Image: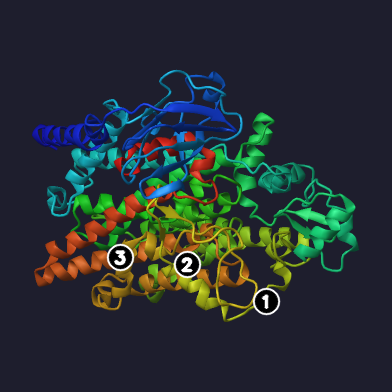
Amino acid sequence: MKISKLFKILIAVLLLEVLVFNYRHWESLAFMEAPFVGVCSDSAIELTGIDAHVSNLYLDPFSGDQTWKTGNAVPLQIEVTDEANALYLKLPETEIVYGIPESFYKRLYLSGKTEKIRISFPEGMPETFAPGAVRINAVRPFLFCLPRVLILFCIGCFLMVFRPGGEIYKIPLSFSEKRQRAAVILWMAVNMAAVGAVGLSCLNFRWTQTEWLADLQYNYLAESLLEGRVSLGIEPPACLLEMENPYDYALRAMKLKESGETLIMDLAYYNGKYYSYFGIVPVILFYIPCLLLTGRQPGAGYIILALGILFVPAAFWYVRTCIRKYWKSVSLGLYLLLSSVLVFGGGILYLVQNSTIYSLPFLLSLLLDLLGITCWMHAAYQEEGKQEGKLHKGWLLAGGICMALVMGCRPSLAIALFLAFPLFWKEIRERKFFSKQGAGNTIAVMAPFFLIGFALMGYNYARFGSFLDFGAAYNMTGFDMTHRGFVPERFKLGFFEYFFQPLTVRPRFPYVYVLAPHMGLVTDHLGQTINEPFLGGYFAMNFVGLPVFLAGRFRTQLREKGLYVYTLMLLLFSVILVGLDTQMVGITARYLSDFSMFMTMAAELVILAALQDSGERGYREELQKVFVILMILCIFTNLWLTASSGIYADLKLMRPRIYYWLKYLSALSL
């Protein structure tokens, strides 16, 4: 980017900072400060004798009592009288945040003159305020926010580079050019930093209630396996043995209360013992080696953070491999955006933010699936000068190992192994698999599935007496999974929620809220509806996924590349996974991650096919602008949703300082 353009962006950002984000300062210069009589009582301060139009209110409870500085935010309720309300009118609840001076000034919109104002604080407020700690119609100081300027400058640079119709979409992608490689590495680092920032914001998140000790079940499992046991070293409540159906949530809760015993939720309970129904592979890969080498076990949050960051180069590698193998004429800008969309639209941000053990099997499975697919693409990729038609057994084996390991993380995501058929269909027809001459290729792909599969079957049999029972149905959760059954009527709700449910938007920061609290989804389905806090469906968060509905329109271009069946299978997997999740569990945000990556991969292939077709018809540039806008919206929407209200690992609860800093960073919130 030219220096002149950077300078223009900087000037524009500075003007925004001075004129827009400090508009309240310039506005308040015309205010006339009003006198009043203030009295503190009953955790409130009442201001009387004002007799003036009130435009703003300045409050600083921290100046008179230093102990208040230990809190992050002080909630307060403002009640006012004016010419339209002789009695107190209650305004929406707000807050004052220590260290954020913008929060001390509350802009009020009242009718005519005001006589009284009452400000209610939580218990423990100071009995008196320091002189000047409460003012009416105060001049708000000019507040230059350097972090805001830097963030806006970075956003401005991003929009300048990736704007629809930008020069970067005219640069043919070439991995051999040093400047392009540097640009790719830089953009990859930015993506990794963004994912890392989301993960770090809630890294120390832990359930504090004792019944959620399930978050440590991998720690218990690692110790048990080293001691030669497959059950966990925790004794379940004795009263469960007396119950005919210990999975009945309400009855179990009553029995536990009567016996005074405590249950650890979300562990598998079978024949009087606790087990972990979570996949064993994360324990083998991370927990046991760490325990043997250091004598200590890692926290799930650190592993999740590392996996989330590693997902970024894996996504860039997949898109790079896909482009090199199937699409020759792609621009640098399109490659960079497609890679980022796979990161932010692939369902990993929620998993990284919700850094508990529940996210670990999901995230590791998605990473292994992506690596496995990419390895298989590499196996059949023919570089110039290489022997035509020869498969690389090393890549075949690496892909098979990755896919097989998924069975020991989250078995349902092992469905991706069937992508081997469309990826290698040409080679299968040429008898390079399932034949005497292709025996080596076949063994390289299938051997990991047999070895790892037999090991997992033995592990299942040792726990539950069945080779194919992974134990998920024995989960001691908020409903009876052993009697969940198959109810076709659930599909209507599940497909709507997971795919099409709109976001719940309100004119109050953070503007996006959960659809319903835990077990509070309102439907006409007269049966047990299981739900956890849920924001919206895939297409509401990822407009970039909408091109999948055009897959049939561009089937000719996809067939030419040998990708039509591959694309359809990605879409089919999404539908199957949503169906399974709906029937087995219900509606919950983290299960969006089961299929979001597959759906986004399919959408990107349709985008590439559509651009090829439009290039042949002469309207590529216009269509590319539309896709670029959808991709930019996908990135910003998913980043913003990490601050949404009501989700697990709610930023307001986990990192209130960051939450309120974001709130008052925006002029819309003041």
Residue 288 appears in which quarter of the rendering? top right
Viewer-closest of 217 and 18 = 18
Please rate how many residues cluster around mark 2, counting C-alpha atoms within 10 Å: few if below 14, some from 14 to 19, many from 20. Answer: many
Give how far apart the Cα atoms at labels 1 and 3 are: 36 Å
Residue 104 appears in which quarter of the rendering? top left
Where does the image place residue 332, in percent across and percent down from the top left? 20, 50
Residue type at mark 3?
Answer: Leu
Earlier in the chain: of badge 1 and badge 3, it is: 1
Please rate how many residues cluster around mark 1, counting C-alpha atoms within 10 Å: few if below 14, some from 14 to 19, many from 20. Answer: few
User: Label 2: which residue?
Assistant: 498
Name the mark nearer the viewer: 2 or 3: 2
Determine which of the numbered discs, if any, sits on residue 605 in the image: 3
Q: Quadrant of the C terminus?
A: top left
Note whether 124 is above or below 308 in the view shown: above
Viewer-closest of 409 and 405 = 409
Earlier in the chain: of badge 2 and badge 1, it is: 1
Residue at (78% x, 58% y) in the render: 269
Where does the image place residue 527, in percent across and percent down from the top left? 64, 76
Name the mark nearer the viewer: 1 or 3: 1
Residue type at mark 1?
Answer: Gly
Residue 285 appears in which quarter of the rendering? top right
Determine which of the numbered discs, if any, sits on residue 128 in the image: none
Where does the image place residue 60, in percent across and percent down from the top left? 44, 26
Q: Secondary structure at mark 1?
A: loop
* Residue 590 located left or right of residue 283: left
Note whether 70 is above or below 498 in the view shown: above
User: Label 1: which residue?
Assistant: 485
Query: Hey, which residue is sitting farthest bottom in the picture?
Result: 488
* Residue 29 located left or right of residue 237: left
Q: Secondary structure at mark 3?
A: helix
